[in-house]
């Protein structure tokens, strides 16, 4: 056992202009949810965060929008300051299921892992539901991206793009992991941390089967009036997701 208990764990829910999906996510937290929760609003301008007045969760804010990396880092810092030993991250976009957060924390609580990645491709859940309505492009790119990580780190990955994950907070005491770099404030941070942990001989990594649900009426080239399902911009943010790998491999950044 790790010595970490449920009381030592906190969930960081990060949100930016998630519309009604933020409250839909909050409504899915069960009444007997065993973990503490903090919500981070990253400069939302759509009024979606008004619903937080109906909940008792502490709220962190950046204004204007700084990026998902900064939001996650702020959740980690809050967890450390409040004495929590493990933190899980869930986006406020209603794509992940709060009742599955226990699956993320389980390997940490059992002393078997320090960093846990949720995977929509790992076996262990209902295959019909765990990738519901996922765009074909996303399904393909998740596999390609995971294969790239597997080759570069020598550790098997099936999903390195889902922002549904958990980690021990003492990872960030490691001098080889510097989360405070400003260039990690947007989509870079998650790639950076994933690579750093998987390449480390100190930290234990595992994946657990989780699900990810996209809206059925999502916006696509064939359905331009559908619901927007992502803030990721083609090319600009794809580069932000990938560049930490190049920077770290060639020693351009630490």
Image (cartoon, helix red, strand yellow):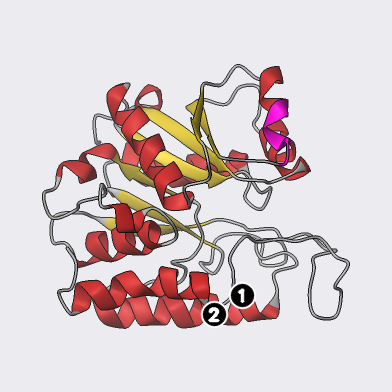
Mark number, residue 141:
2
Is 154 placed left or right of 40 in the picture?
A: left
Q: Within the magenta stretch, is there residue 49?
A: yes
Which quadrant of the structure image shows residue 222? bottom right
Q: Residue at x 26, y 49 (%)?
A: 179
What secondary structure is the magenta-colored segment mainly? helix
Identify whether 183 is placed above or below 123.
above
Q: Residue at x 39, y 30 (%)?
A: 9
Give the magenta range. Answer: 46-50
Determine whether label 2 and label 1 are within 8 Å by CB.
Answer: yes
Circle 1 SS class: helix
Identify whether 231 is placed above or below 14.
below
Which residue has dot 1 on it?
Answer: 138
Is 69 placed left or right of 48 in the picture?
A: left
Residue 5 location, x and y as percent?
Answer: 34, 27
Residue 66 location, x and y as percent?
Answer: 47, 47
Is residue 28 among the parts visible in the rendering? no
In which quadrant is the C terminus drawn?
bottom left
Q: Within the magenta stretch, is there residue 13?
A: no
């Amino acid at each position: 056992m790790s010595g970490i208990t449920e009381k030592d764990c906190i969930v960081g829910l990060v949100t930016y202009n998630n519309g009604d999906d933020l409250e839909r996510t909050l409504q899915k937290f069960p009444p007997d949810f065993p973990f503490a929760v903090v919500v981070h609003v990253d400069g939302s301008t759509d009024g979606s965060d008004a619903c937080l007045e109906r909940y008792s969760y502490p709220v962190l804010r950046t204004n204007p929008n700084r990026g998902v990396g900064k939001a996650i880092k702020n959740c980690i810092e809050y967890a450390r300051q409040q004495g929590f030993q493990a933190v899980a991250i869930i986006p406020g976009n209603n794509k992940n299921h709060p009742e599955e957060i226990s699956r993320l924390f389980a390997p940490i609580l059992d002393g078997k892992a320090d960093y846990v990645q949720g995977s929509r491709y790992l076996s262990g859940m209902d295959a019909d539901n765990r990738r519901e309505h996922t765009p074909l492009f996303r399904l393909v790119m998740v596999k390609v991206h995971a294969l790239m990580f597997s080759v570069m780190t020598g550790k098997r990955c099936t999903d390195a793009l889902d922002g549904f994950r958990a980690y021990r907070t003492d990872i960030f005491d490691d001098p080889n992991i510097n989360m405070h770099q400003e260039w990690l404030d947007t989509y870079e941070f998650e790639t950076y941390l994933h690579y750093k942990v998987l390449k480390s001989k100190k930290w234990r990594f595992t994946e657990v089967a989780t699900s990810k649900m996209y809206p059925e009426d999502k916006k696509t080239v064939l359905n331009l009036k559908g619901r927007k399902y992502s803030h990721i911009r083609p090319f600009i943010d794809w580069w932000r997701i990938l560049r930490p790998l190049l920077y770290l491999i060639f020693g351009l950044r630490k």
